[in-house]
Amino acid sequence: QAGYRGFHRVIDESHPEELKSDDQVRKVVFCSGKIYYELLEKRRYEEKDDVAIVRVEQLSPFPFDKVAENVAKYPNATEVAWAQEEPKNMGAWMFVHDRILTATREINGAEVRPTYVGRKTMASPAEGYGDVHTREQDRIAHEAIVD
């Protein structure tokens, strides 16, 4: 396969040419799955050049080293966030939260507390209505990239 680079536990910021220099990035957003494409689209639409998006493709075993490396890469980022489209109690958030804390504390020597961007805790994995789902997806992308 032409261009195939193999599996990566973490995919670093894929479009660094669209961002300011590493020391001018204000926010690092970690995510997993297809929400990445919505976040990237939002970043481009809003012309935000100070938000790095990093994809965690392997959740277990957790890539402590690569997560710590990506946080350290942006030394002046004032926020590290985890974005997901699933409700808070159903996606990876509950799993990754403590692991991001551990990665930054044990490897980088300075614990970084990630913020959560996604749907609230729900009993159902879906909103139930297409237009409500679309509004929630837009809110998640906005909060992750613009706020």
Image: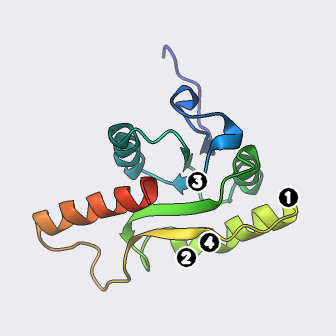
Q: Against 85, is 51 above or below?
A: above
Q: Position of residue 15 (x, y in %)?
A: 52, 30
Left or right of residue 84, residue 128 in this image: left
Q: Which residue is mark 4?
A: 97
The residue at the point 29 percent across, 74 percent down is 125
How far apart are the alpha carbons under marks 3 and 4? 16 Å
Q: Are marks 2 and 3 in contact (CB under 8 Å)?
A: no
**Contact (Cβ within 8 Å) of mark 4 with mark 2:** yes
Amino acid type at circle 4 is His
Residue 78 shown left or right of residue 31 in the figure: right
- Camera-side residue of 25 and 99: 25
Residue at the spot 68% in from the left edge and 65% down from the top edge = 100
Q: Amino acid at mark 1?
A: Ile
Location of mark 2 (residue): 94
Residue 90's image quarter? bottom left
Residue that numbered label 1 is attached to = 107
**Circle 4 SS class:** helix
Residue 125 is left or right of residue 50, and the answer is left
- Mark 2 against mark 3, which lies toward the viewer? 3
Q: Given this view, does label 3 or label 4 mark the residue nearer the observer?
A: 3
